[in-house]
Image: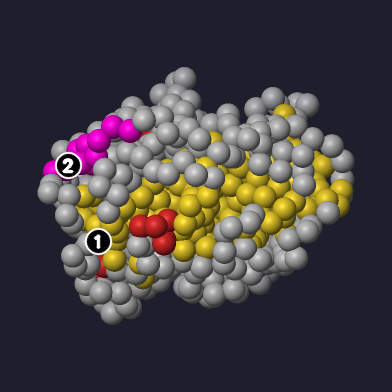
């Protein structure tokens, strides 16, 4: 049943979907309590109660940086023994079965896994704790890491010498490569500003915190029988980097001292368009954009909690709230769709990765530079009314898990205990570059309001993943139906690949992988 709340509709359609690792254990929260929240913007100390976060999240100087084109290469670091992935060219149908539905776990002997991704040559990557596997497109055989590599190499745990408490997601890179995300504590001991080498408070132990969590780029070995580490990502293209650009993981591109983005919870490979092959990852704090080994970090639809001062005659402090980002999507128009624990955003990408993290023109940015500016940055009105950027009371957390746009132009957002909603996003009367969200409609009929993933497909459908009720499809005629033949209860992931004909939808449910063709 579709229950109308406000009004009418228009829009664009989705090119692909995201990998999302829901490590909430049904709570809606990540592995640590609470969400990453920046402290008052006029304070120099961490915000009380959140473990210490960025007191100046958007501070930073300008020491240059690079400006790669969308297909930028690997630069001068890392290894690349099999640049073509060791796979043969494929037909338009791709190398895999074209049946309407195939149980890949049974057909190819894939054990239960936590995450799945598809690379530039249609190799299928899977993640199982400290094991990384790839179902090769040329041999159709599964290859596993012989031993833990990268962040998993020292074992998972919270010991000072360990680099991650666990793995989270995997998504395909270029041919024969994949990106693997990890989690760690979401706050740095002593605060999230870490002194650099040569600064008075520099500490090797403290500095080691920079390297925890984040993301590895892995690839098939030269003989195609193993998976090896290419590089742990650290190459910021932003305006602030250590003088030696040391391998200290992902940190703020506009001030490398701040390590806010530490745990990776979602990962999306762009499947077509001018930026095909780029990767977006959702973290405990925002979204990082990646081209091969280089990245720009970060963006997030955020809001500010007003914190009263002891002297009521003084204006309150403003404390930034960003939240975990599990929901990533990509519209037909090429816009990034972001859904975090509170808000949603529509963000058109720009060509120059160096300036992707900037939200306004400022000193040091060349005149005429295209920036990536929000078309929409909002709360979802029916469940978080008001759409205030600043609030005196904490906003309700909605734990959004999916944000997509169907072929008819309608947008859909869904989350844990927040339901499934359809809405329009149309240009405002006063600014054609900004959208307003209107005409929300709640969609019921799955028997639950716990949603884990969404995927919009080229035939106009919206596939809907639930926690407890399996996989559903909202047809182009807006009829909601259970997808037959896909067993299981909790949909962990939906990955849509329109590069093959018929298109492929990868469905990970209760650890098993199914593939639907032709939507």
Residue 466: x and y, percent?
63, 62
Q: Earlier in the sequence, mark 1 or mark 2?
A: 2
The quadrant of the image that shows the N terminus is bottom right
Give the dominant element type of the magenta stretch: helix, strand or loop.
loop
Q: Is residue 255 above or below residue 326?
A: above
Give the residue drawn at x 42%, y 34%: 93
Residue 64: x and y, percent?
29, 34
Give the residue drawn at x 69%, y 56%: 482
Horizontal arrangement in the rendering, residue 370 relative to residue 302 (left or right): left
Residue 510 lies in the magenta stretch: no
Give the residue drawn at x 26%, y 43%: 138
Give the residue pinned by disc 1.
144
The quadrant of the image that shows the C terminus is top right
In front here: 308 or 279?
A: 279
Circle 1: is it few (<14), some (14-19), or many (20+) Cα within 10 Å? some
Q: Is residue 103 above or below residue 160?
A: above
Horizontal arrangement in the rendering, residue 49 relative to residue 366 (left or right): right
Residue 89 lies in the magenta stretch: yes
Circle 2: is it few (<14), some (14-19), or many (20+) Cα within 10 Å? some
Give the residue pinned by disc 2.
82
Magenta stretch? Answer: 80-90
- Residue 284, which numbered label? none
């Amino acid at each position: 049943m579709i229950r109308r709340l406000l009004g009418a509709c228009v829009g664009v359609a989705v090119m692909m979907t995201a990998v999302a690792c829901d490590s909430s254990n049904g709570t809606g929260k990540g592995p640590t309590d609470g969400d990453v929240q920046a402290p008052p913007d006029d304070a120099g100390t961490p915000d009380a109660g959140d473990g210490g976060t960025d007191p100046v999240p958007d501070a930073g100087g300008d020491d240059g940086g690079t400006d790669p084109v969308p297909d930028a290469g690997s630069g001068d670091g890392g290894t690349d023994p099999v640049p073509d992935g060791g796979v043969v060219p494929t037909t338009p149908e791709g190398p895999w079965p074209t049946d309407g539905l195939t149980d890949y776990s049974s057909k190819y002997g894939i054990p239960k896994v936590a995450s799945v991704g598809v690379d530039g040559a249609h190799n299928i990557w899977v993640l199982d704790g400290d094991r990384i596997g790839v179902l090769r497109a040329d041999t159709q055989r599964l290859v596993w890491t012989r031993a833990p590599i990268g962040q998993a190499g020292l074992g998972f745990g919270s010991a000072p010498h360990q680099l991650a408490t666990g793995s989270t997601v995997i998504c395909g890179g270029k041919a024969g490569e994949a990106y693997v995300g990890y989690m760690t504590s979401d706050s740095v001991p002593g605060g999230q500003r870490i002194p650099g080498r040569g600064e008075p408070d520099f500490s090797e132990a403290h500095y080691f915190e920079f390297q925890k969590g984040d993301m590895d780029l892995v690839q098939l070995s030269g003989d195609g029988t193993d998976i090896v580490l290419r590089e742990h990502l650290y190459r910021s293209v932003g305006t602030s980097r250590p003088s030696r650009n040391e391998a200290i993981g992902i940190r703020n591109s506009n001030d490398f001292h701040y390590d806010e983005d530490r745990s990776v919870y979602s990962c999306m490979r762009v499947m077509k368009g001018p930026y095909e092959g780029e990767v977006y990852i959702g973290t405990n704090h925002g979204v990082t954009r990646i081209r091969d080994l280089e990245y720009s970090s970060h963006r997030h639809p955020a809001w500010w909690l007003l914190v009263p001062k002891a002297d009521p005659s003084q204006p309150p402090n403003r404390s930034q709230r960003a939240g975990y980002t599990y929901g990533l999507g990509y519209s037909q128009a090429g816009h990034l769709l972001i859904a975090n624990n509170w808000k949603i955003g529509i963000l058109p990408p720009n060509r120059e990765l160096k300036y992707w993290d900037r939200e306004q023109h400022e000193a040091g940015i060349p005149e005429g530079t295209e920036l990536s500016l929000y078309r929409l940055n909002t709360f979802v009105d029916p469940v978080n009314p008001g759409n205030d950027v600043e609030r005196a009371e904490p906003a309700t957390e909605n734990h959004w898990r999916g944000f997509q746009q169907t072929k008819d132009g309608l947008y859909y957002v869904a989350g844990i205990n927040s339901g499934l909603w359809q809405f329009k996003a149309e240009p405002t009367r006063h600014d054609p570059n900004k959208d307003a969200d209107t005409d929300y409609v709640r969609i019921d009929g799955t028997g639950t309001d716990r949603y884990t993933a969404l995927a919009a497909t080229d035939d106009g459908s919206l596939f809907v993943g639930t926690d407890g009720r399996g996989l559903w499809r909202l047809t182009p005629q807006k009829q909601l139906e259970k997808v037959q033949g896909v067993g299981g209860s909790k949909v962990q992931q939906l990955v849509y690949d329109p590069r093959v004909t018929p298109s492929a939808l990868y469905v990970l449910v209760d650890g098993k992988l199914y593939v639907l063709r032709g939507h």
